[in-house]
Amino acid sequence: MKSYVVYPDHTCGFEEMPMPRYGEYDCLVKLLSCGVCKGTDTKIIHGTFKGIDSYPTVLGHEGVATVVEKGAKVKNFEIGDMVLMPYWSDVPEGYSSGWGTYSEYNIITDAYAMEADGLRPDEFAYGQRKLPKDFDPVSSAMIITFREVLSTLKRFSIEPNKSLVVLGLGPVGLCFVQFAKLMGVGPVIAVGRDDEKLRQAEKRGADYLINSKKQNICEEVRKILPDGADFALDAVGDTSFINEALGFIVPDGKICVYGISEASSANIDWSRCPYNWTLHFHQFPSKKAESEAHEQIVNWIKMGVLDPNDYISDVFDFADIDKAFKKIENHEPVMKMVIRF
């Protein structure tokens, strides 16, 4: 089978790999699609993703697949099921796993069958869930991002009727805006540098828009919320936003960092902020928490209040995956890109 690999010199290419080996609690799955994660994938390619420093590594983590074979002790998946988020941990010797979902075949594990037999599954397995049979296999790759965002909002303890400022209006930031509104958060202030993305935020329910290229964020937030914002959320990985947000949060307000920055340190100046405040990093979502968010996301899609296609700008065949990363490197305006197998 073919896999897409990042080499030590940070170039990428296809390699012929042996089929993944699966155990008695695992299923072999055939990939249908995989979302391109601009944050994680590109940082792994550039060698700046914390925790992945061994190359070559097999890339990809936002997969949708169908079960083609199953182990003897699998109870909760059947052949033909469409499933989310396979993970190839047992890659061949000489390679490391960047979750390995840009591969034609992969593995999922029946976490709950293992639990029932007194075994402890890898935490990642909890996020591997079935999808309704009538869901589109390509656009469903977006559901992984949806689950991450919803579970992260809950982890940040962002509550209804509280004010929220969201920095960064890529697919993730737009999800934060839309889901916050669906949860009753408000007002929600969207901050971005591009007028089209600001319009997209408005379509998703943002109450106020701030163009950070033309306006001072702190001044504009204070015009809207003289007492300050309850929550400020970095969805892009801009460490300077921590200091920006310290100028407009309320006493006991919270700055929430979700976007992964290539820098692992920042100078924080809390001279302008209230005496009491919280800085909360949540950059690697819990797969158990994602699993708990799964049904709510599925129900929102069934109800018609959430459409994955609203977040997808490009679909490429697996053979053309380089075209997706070229768009990112060229800073072309894109939403979520999906690779189709």
Image: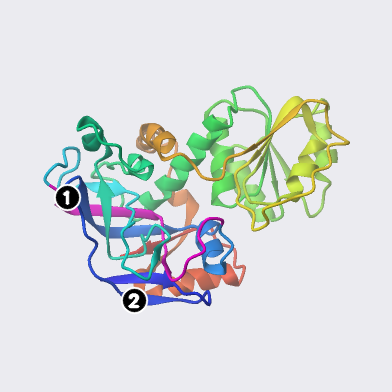
Residue that mark 1 sits on: 80
Instruction: Report crowding for label 1: few under 14, some 14 to 19, many 20 or more residues within 10 A (C-alpha).
Output: some
Over which residues does the magenta segment extend? 50-71
Along the horizontal axis of the image, is 338 left or right of 267?
A: left
Q: Is residue 334 magenta?
A: no
| On-image quarter of the C terminus | bottom left
Q: Position of residue 300 (x, y in %)?
A: 40, 34
Residue 170 position in % (x across, y down):
59, 52
Q: CA distance from mark 2 to mark 1?
A: 27 Å
* Residue 301: image tag: none
Nearer to the camera, 193 or 126? 126
Residue drawn 63% across the image and 42% down it: 202
Q: Residues within 10 Å of mark 2 (few under 14, many from 20)?
A: few
Q: Is residue 333 visible in this depiction of the protein? A: yes
Query: Residue 86 at what x, y percent from top left?
Result: 32, 52
Classify residue 201 as left or right of residue 9: right
Q: Position of residue 1 (x, y in %)?
A: 25, 71
Q: Is residue 214 above or below residue 231?
A: below
Residue 3 falls in which quadrant of the image? Answer: bottom left
Helix, strand or loop at mark 1? loop
Label 1 amino acid?
Answer: Gly
For this orientation, the residue located farthest to the top is 161
- Kindly indicate the quadrant of the structure image that contains residue 90: bottom left
Q: Which residue position holds label 2?
A: 15
What residue type is disc 2 on? Glu
Mark 2, secondary structure of its residue: strand
Against 35, residue 174 (above or below) is above
Q: Earlier in the sequence, mark 2 or mark 1?
A: 2
Image depth: mark 2 or mark 1 in front = 2
Colour convention of the picture: rainbow
Outermost residue, right side: 271
Say if 33 sits above or below 158 in the image.
Answer: below
